[in-house]
Image (spheres, rainbow, N blue to C red):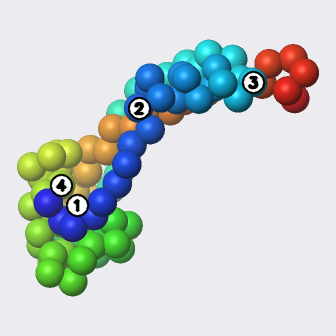
Amino acid sequence: MTGHEVSYLSKDFATSLCANTGWREPEFHDIDLKWSFENEQHLGRFLGLLLANKASFSEADSVAAAKHYLGVRDTDDGLSLDWPMTMMTSSALPGYE
């Protein structure tokens, strides 16, 4: 949508990577993050820089994509951006520490 290309580490791939490299089976934790911004201009600038958007995508394009795919809500202080993430934790097996 915004020209940003990304590859996500799937849970299956992360689990196999741990198994093959001396780590215990990972645990996955979903985190419901909400980031606050003063206004749409600040949100658009942040997303454009974070995602290294191509020049053909404006900050307004980034805001529109965030509203569509992630969720943006008005707050008393500005805007709240929904940014769900998954955290993976694991520890080294004995002998791999």
- Of pointers 2 and 3, the one earlier in the residue sequence: 2
Cα separation, mark 4 vs mark 1, equals: 15 Å
Q: Dot 4: within a 10 Å radius of its alpha carbon, few (fewer than 14), some, or many (20 or more) residues? A: some
Residue pointed to by mark 3: 22
Res 82 quadrant in image:
top left
Q: Residue at x 62, y 16 (%)?
A: 25
Q: CA distance from mark 2 to mark 3?
A: 18 Å
Of residues 3 and 68, the one drawn nearer to the viewer in this rendering:
3
Location of residue 18 by image quarter: top right
Q: Nearer the viewer, mark 4 or mark 2?
A: 2
Q: Quadrant of the N terminus?
A: bottom left
In front here: 40 or 97?
Answer: 97
Residue at the disc numbered 2: 10
Q: Earlier in the sequence, mark 1 or mark 3?
A: 3
Q: Which residue is denoted by mark 1 in the rendering?
A: 78
> What amino acid does circle 2 point to?
Ser
Q: Label 4: which residue?
A: 66
* Image depth: mark 4 or mark 1 in front: 4
Say what amino acid the circle numbered 4 marks: Ala
Secondary structure of the residue carrying numbered label 4:
helix
Is the residue 88 above or below the residue 24 in the image? below
Q: Earlier in the sequence, mark 4 or mark 1?
A: 4
Specify which label sits upstream in the sequence, 4 or 2.
2
Q: Is residue 62 above or below residue 82?
A: below
Where residue 8 appears, as percent x and y from the top left, is 39, 43
Q: Is residue 81 above or below residue 61?
A: above
Front tag of 2 and 1: 2
Q: Is residue 62 visible?
A: yes
Q: Say if mark 4 contacts mark 2, CB within 8 Å.
A: no
Disc 4 vs disc 3: which is toward the camera? 3
Three-letter code, disc 3: Gly
